[in-house]
Image: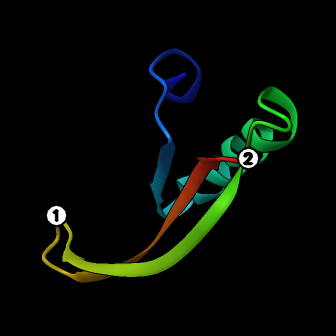
Amino acid sequence: MQVTTQGAPEVIIKARGKFIARAVDVAEVAAKRFLEGTINIKDIRIDSEEFENKEGKQVRVSTIEITLGKK
């Protein structure tokens, strides 16, 4: 929506943990079906964050950032 209605040159899809698969699906559908020939995947960054959960235990969660940009 940001690319088509607001004219954004780039969109970043961010996700953590179990939602990474959904972010990849969104990026693939946008680039190969919804906006085919208009945008492509420019960059993919992976990382992990460490934080303390409710029980006080240190937990590491994977993260992903997928950058979609106009061709």
Label 2 sits on residue: 25
Q: Is residue 26 above or below residue 66?
A: above
- For label 2, the crowd category at 10 Å Cα-Cα, with few meaning under 14, some 14 to 19 and many 20 or more, is few
Amino acid at circle 1: Lys
Residue 22 picture location, percent across and down: 64, 47
Q: Residue 42 sits in which quadrant?
A: bottom right
Say whether residue 45 is left or right of residue 60. Answer: right
Q: Residue 70 sits in which quadrant?
A: top right
Q: Could you tell me which residue is drawn at 60 percent across and 50 percent down?
A: 68
Choose between 34 and 56: the one closer to the eye. Answer: 34
Looking at the rendered structure, the number of numbered marks drawn on it comes to 2
Amino acid at circle 2: Asp
Label 1 sits on residue: 54
The Cα atoms of the two marked residues, 1 and 2, are separated by: 30 Å
Q: Nearer the viewer, mark 1 or mark 2?
A: 2
**Tag 1–tag 2 contact (CB < 8 Å):** no
Q: Is residue 10 above or below residue 41?
A: above
Residue 7 picture location, percent across and down: 49, 25
- For label 1, the crowd category at 10 Å Cα-Cα, with few meaning under 14, some 14 to 19 and many 20 or more, is few
